[in-house]
Amino acid sequence: MRILIIEDNAIQALYLETVMNNMGFQETAKANSYDQAIKLIEDFKPELLLVDINLDDELTGIDVVKSLNGNSESQVIYISGNSDRFYKNQIEGTKHLGYLVKPISQRELRHMLESVNILQ
């Protein structure tokens, strides 16, 4: 399974990549901005997006998902440092599998992937 990690914090992106590799997912790519994410979605054709909501950019991870407009087979899991209702309301209009609040553990991510049948 191809996985795209959309995360502007390099340490967090590397952590997520390591966790995914430890779970057996070897095809991963990382994007740290809206523009880079859109390009990698087109070129890498990921099956799963791990999306940070707040990117160090005017556009957010939510904007990345909205730009897909149903034209991608990618499944989405949001990962954010914010747990308030404001962000949860923003993602309601997007197709996604779940929402995890940072900091996340490998166990939490594994549980999420198992609950949506990505990981057996």
Image (cartoon, helix red, strand yellow):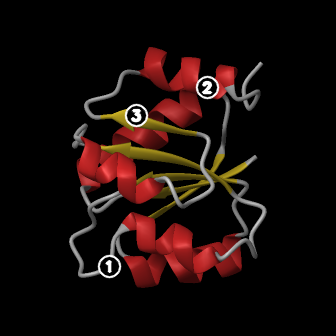
| Above/below status of 42 relative to 109 | below
The label shown at residue 100 is: 3
Residue type highlighted by circle 3: Leu
Who comes first in sequence, dot 3 or dot 1?
1
Q: Are marks 3 and 1 in contact (CB under 8 Å)?
A: no
Asked if residue 13 shows in the view, the reply is no
At 42% from the left edge and 40% from the top edge, which residue is drawn?
16
Q: Which residue is mark 1?
A: 59
- What residue type is disc 2 on? Met
Q: Which residue is mark 2?
A: 23
Closer to us: 25 or 115: 115
Q: How many marks?
A: 3
Q: Residue at x 31, y 34 (%)?
A: 101
Q: Nearer the viewer, mark 2 or mark 1?
A: 1
- Callouts 2 and 1 close, C-beta under 8 Å: no
Rendered location of residue 83, percent (x, y): 25, 37
Mark 2 or mark 1: name the one nearer the start of the chain: 2
Above or below, 17 against 34 in this view is above
Mark 2 secondary-structure assignment: loop
Q: Quadrant of the C terminus?
A: top right
Residue 3 relative to residue 50: left or right: right
Q: Residue at x 73, y 55 (%)?
A: 47
Q: Position of residue 22 (x, y in %)?
A: 55, 26
